[in-house]
Image: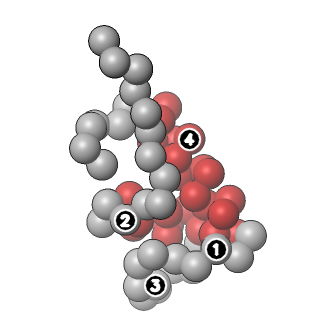
């Protein structure tokens, strides 16, 4: 992600992606140990491969 996410944006993105994963979406990262959707979403965020983006209003 190009910009730093605040804690609210991060929670929203992780929750949305975890929901997608729990409903059958394919993970964008290699799953090694944990199959928990939240853990997978966190790993996707860390590796910057989330298929979601946050748009900030221009100031």
Q: Earlier in the sequence, mark 4 or mark 3?
A: 4
Residue at figure coordinates x 40%, y 27% from the top left:
56
Q: What element carries label 3?
A: loop
Q: Which of marks 2 and 4 is in front?
A: 2
Q: Which of marks 1 and 4 is in front?
A: 1
Is the Cβ of the residue at disc 4 closer than 8 Å to that at disc 3?
A: no
Marks 1 and 2, how far apart at CA: 14 Å
Whether residue 22 is visible here, answered yes or no, is: yes
Q: Which of marks 3 and 1 is nearer the N terminus?
A: 1
Q: In this view, does 56 lie above or below 5?
A: above
Q: Earlier in the sequence, mark 1 or mark 2?
A: 1
Is the Cβ of the residue at disc 1 closer than 8 Å to that at disc 4?
A: no
Q: Which of marks 3 and 2 is nearer the N terminus?
A: 3
Q: What element carries label 1?
A: loop
Marks 3 and 1, how far apart at CA: 13 Å
Horizontal side, residue 56 vs residue 27: left or right: left
Graded by Cα atoms within 10 Å as few (under 14), some (14 to 19) or many (20 or more), the crowding at tag 3 reads few
Which residue is label 2 attached to?
A: 49
Q: Which mark is residue 25?
A: 1
Graded by Cα atoms within 10 Å as few (under 14), some (14 to 19) or many (20 or more), the crowding at tag 4 reads few
Q: Earlier in the sequence, mark 1 or mark 4?
A: 4
Which residue is label 4 attached to?
A: 12
- Quarter residue 26 falls in: bottom right
Residue 49 location, x and y as percent?
A: 37, 65
Graded by Cα atoms within 10 Å as few (under 14), some (14 to 19) or many (20 or more), the crowding at tag 2 reads some
Residue at figure coordinates x 43%, y 60% from the top left:
50
Considering depth in this image, is 36 or 51 the residue closer to the camera? 51
Horizontal side, residue 17 vs residue 59: left or right: right
Horizontal side, residue 20 vs residue 44: left or right: right
Q: Is mark 2 on a helix, strand or loop?
A: loop
- Quarter residue 4 falls in: top left
Which residue is label 3 attached to?
A: 31
């Amino acid at each position: 992600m190009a910009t730093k996410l605040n804690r609210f944006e991060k929670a929203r993105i992780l929750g949305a992606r975890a929901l997608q994963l729990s409903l059958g979406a394919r993970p964008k990262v290699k799953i090694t140990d944990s199959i928990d959707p939240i853990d997978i979403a966190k790993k996707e965020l860390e590796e910057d491969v989330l298929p979601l983006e946050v748009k900030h209003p221009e100031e």
